[in-house]
Each structure stands twice: as structure tokens, then as C-alpha cells.
Image (cartoon, rainbow, N blue to C red):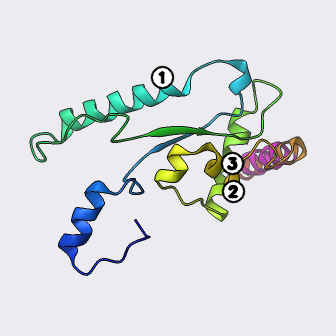
């Protein structure tokens, strides 16, 4: 939590346990093909939580015992509004562009971001970029692939 300045480490640790603004980890689902209804965010989040806990049990339980199950409360997930693709082939191009935008201008992900859609919509939205951007990016990727292929053949 960045809203409170505490005098000691012990005070900060105690506050961290009760502060609802403190999020250690979360999942954010970017689904440009949501209207195709190919999957649900809640199923994806549930499967990722199960996988992570199974991995912990298989690899770390002996050296780091005592971790409780990974639940919705411990690892929340949310979907954010993003532009919608008009075909079933451009999800990777959309993903790459959204990641670029996140790296340039990352949002502050805290309890408010997870709980309130209006906070997420300040950073993301169905109009955050247009189809022309995706068409240009697809062309850029194609040029890069051709360039790399040509350079490997030489």
C-alpha cells in the first residue's frame, strides 16, 4: 500500500496483512475475442490457480512448507476491456500490441484496480486502438519474418 507511511518494519508488515489495497499477485485477462465465447475468464483463472498450486506441491513443498491453497482471495483475477477483433486469427497480434502498450504505460494494479471496473477502464478500453493499428502491426510482423528468413538463407 502506498497510501500509508509507517514508522517501523513491524508496523508495515502488520498493515500489509489487513490492507485491502495490497495485492501481491493477480491475473489480468485480455480477451480481444470475447464475443466468440471460446472460453471463460473464470475457468482460465481457476485452471491457472490449480496449476500453480500443483507446481508448488511438486517442486517446493519440501523446501517451503506451509503455503495455503491459491484461492480467488489470495490470487484474484479480472478481465479488462480491450478492442475486439473481427476474426479468429488476430488474437496474437492483439496480444502483442496490448503488451507493447502495457510496457510503455503500465497501470497501477492494486485492490481498486481488481475490484472496480471503472478503475480498469481508465487505463484500458474497447477504443484504446483501432483495427488500422492491428493491420499495420500484422504487416510489420510479416516484413520481419521475411527479413529474418532471407537473412538465414544467405
Instruction: Residue at 18% x, 42% y: name it.
Output: 67
CA separation in Å, label 1 and label 2 = 26 Å
The quadrant holding residue 32 is top right
Is the residue under label 3 in contact with that under label 1 (CB below 8 Å)? no
**Is residue 150 shown left or right of residue 112?**
right
| Chain part drawn in magenta | 136-149
- The local crowd at label 3, few if under 14, some if 14 to 19, many if 20 or more residues have their Cα within 10 Å, is some
Question: In the image, which is nearer the foreground, mark 2 or mark 3?
Answer: 3
Q: Nearer the viewer, residue 15 or 144?
A: 15
Question: In the image, which is nearer the foreground, mark 1 or mark 2?
Answer: 1
Name the N-terminal-most of marks 2 and 3: 2
Instruction: Residue at 9% x, 41% y: name it.
Output: 62
Name the N-terminal-most of marks 1 and 3: 1
Give how far across and how far down residue 113 sits, in percent.
54, 51
141 drawn magenta: yes
Q: Note whether 140 is above or below 1 in the view shown.
A: above
CA separation in Å, label 2 and label 3 = 14 Å
Instruction: Residue at 34% x, 57% y: name it.
Output: 19
> Secondary structure beneath disc 3?
helix
CA separation in Å, label 1 and label 3 = 23 Å
Q: Which residue is the site of mark 2?
A: 101
Q: Which residue is the site of mark 1?
A: 43
- The local crowd at label 2, few if under 14, some if 14 to 19, many if 20 or more residues have their Cα within 10 Å, is some
133 drawn magenta: no
Q: Which residue is the site of mark 3?
A: 121
Question: In the image, which is nearer the foreground, mark 1 or mark 3?
Answer: 3
> Secondary structure beneath disc 2?
helix
Amino acid at each position: 500500500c502506498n497510501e500509508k507511511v509507517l514508522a517501523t518494519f513491524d508496523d508495515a508488515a502488520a498493515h500489509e496483512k489487513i490492507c485491502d489495497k495490497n495485492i501481491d499477485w493477480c491475473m489480468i485477462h485480455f480477451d480481444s475475442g470475447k464475443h466468440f465465447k471460446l472460453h471463460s475468464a473464470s475457468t482460465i483463472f481457476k485452471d491457472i490457480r490449480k496449476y500453480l498450486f500443483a507446481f508448488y506441491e511438486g517442486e517446493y513443498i519440501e523446501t517451503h512448507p506451509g503455503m495455503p491453497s491459491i484461492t480467488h482471495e489470495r490470487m484474484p483475477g479480472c478481465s479488462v476491456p480491450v478492442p475486439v477483433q473481427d476474426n479468429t486469427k488476430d488474437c496474437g497480434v492483439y496480444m502483442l500490441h496490448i503488451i507493447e502498450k502495457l510496457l510503455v504505460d503500465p497501470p497501477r494494479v492494486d485492490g481498486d484496480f481488481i475490484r472496480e471496473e471503472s478503475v480498469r477502464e481508465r487505463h484500458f478500453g474497447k477504443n484504446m486502438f483501432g483495427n488500422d493499428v492491428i493491420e499495420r502491426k500484422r504487416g510489420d510482423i510479416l516484413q520481419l519474418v521475411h527479413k529474418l528468413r532471407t537473412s538465414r538463407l544467405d
